[in-house]
Image: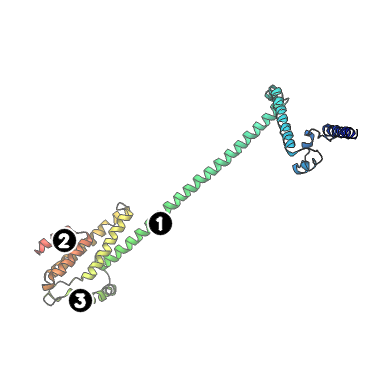
Amino acid sequence: MTAKMNKFRFGESDDSASDFDDDTSGLPFPEPLSRHSFLSPDFNPAAYLSSLTNRHQSLEDLRQELRDLDQRLSRELLDLVNENYQDFLSLGSTLQGGEEKVEQVRVGLLAFQRDVQSIRDKVEARQREVEQLLNEKKRVRANANIGTALLDFADRVEELEKRLMIGEHPVRDTAEQSDIESEFLESDEETDEEDTDEEGPQAGEGTAPLVSQKRLESHLQKYVYLTRLSSRVGDEHPFLLAQQQRMSKIRSALLLDLKKALEQAKQAGERRDTRTLAVLRLYKLMGEDTSAVSALKSLAI
């Protein structure tokens, strides 16, 4: 009896526990998430999640509910666009008074475009002007360089004429002639030993004056510089064309001095070959190889 009662009590106890486990009506079930919670201008995700601590809901269930809400909003947006698609297309034509606004904008854009084009034209014109000025500057600088070269050419021609005693320069007073001769005194003294030979002729009465090869080489170098300067400027330049006669006289005087130096080398005895080669080198420096051959033939060297 006691066992039965205990058994009954035990069974009654089991039924009560079972009833307690199955009865969930008293639990606070979470309410569905409201979309209005997300419409707040100052919405903060962290603060919103902190407010959901009393929902009695697992994190995975909350994630799934958020996914469902996102999908539902996406479907609603798509449905809204589809329902109002024709209205969206006809929105431009149904506007009242929009033509005037569009025309005002178009006129403003055209005016802005004209202003931009005007500024661009001014910039391009200024650019062309600057380019013209730069080209003019280059041309003026080139002409200035040519002018400087021509002045240098004229000065050197005159100097070489003075040294060679040709043109109008021999006609001068005694004092000026002495100044010119004094310029060559030092070089003549240095080359006396080179230009004289014990077996060769000595300068004196009835003999031609000795030609200093060192001074002759200096004259030739000045002449070669003049020819190169003329080529650099342009041999057809009017000023250079006017100097051709003077250059021809200088060339003739130098060739005459070279021939005299060759004659002296012929009479130099043991030093004949050395002096001859030195004179031929001066012919080559001047670019007168043909004249050198003709001089050698005439002197039978």
Residue under pointer 1: 144
- The location of residue 288, given as percent across then percent down, is 19, 59
Q: Amino acid at mark 3?
A: Asp
Residue at left 42%, top 55%?
141
Q: Are marks 3 and 2 in contact (CB under 8 Å)?
A: no
Query: In the displayed structure, does residue 265 sit left or right of residue 49?
Result: left
> Dot 2 lies on which element?
helix
Residue at left 52%, top 43%?
125
Q: Distance of mark 3 from mark 2, alpha carbons?
A: 24 Å
Residue under pointer 2: 292
Residue under pointer 3: 192
Q: Quadrant of residue 34?
A: top right
Q: Distance of mark 1 from mark 3, alpha carbons?
A: 44 Å
Q: Is residue 13 above or below residue 134?
A: above
Tell me the quarter of the image containing the N terminus. Answer: top right
Query: In the displayed structure, does residue 273 sit left or right of residue 37?
Result: left
Q: Residues within 10 Å of mark 3 (few under 14, many from 20)?
A: few
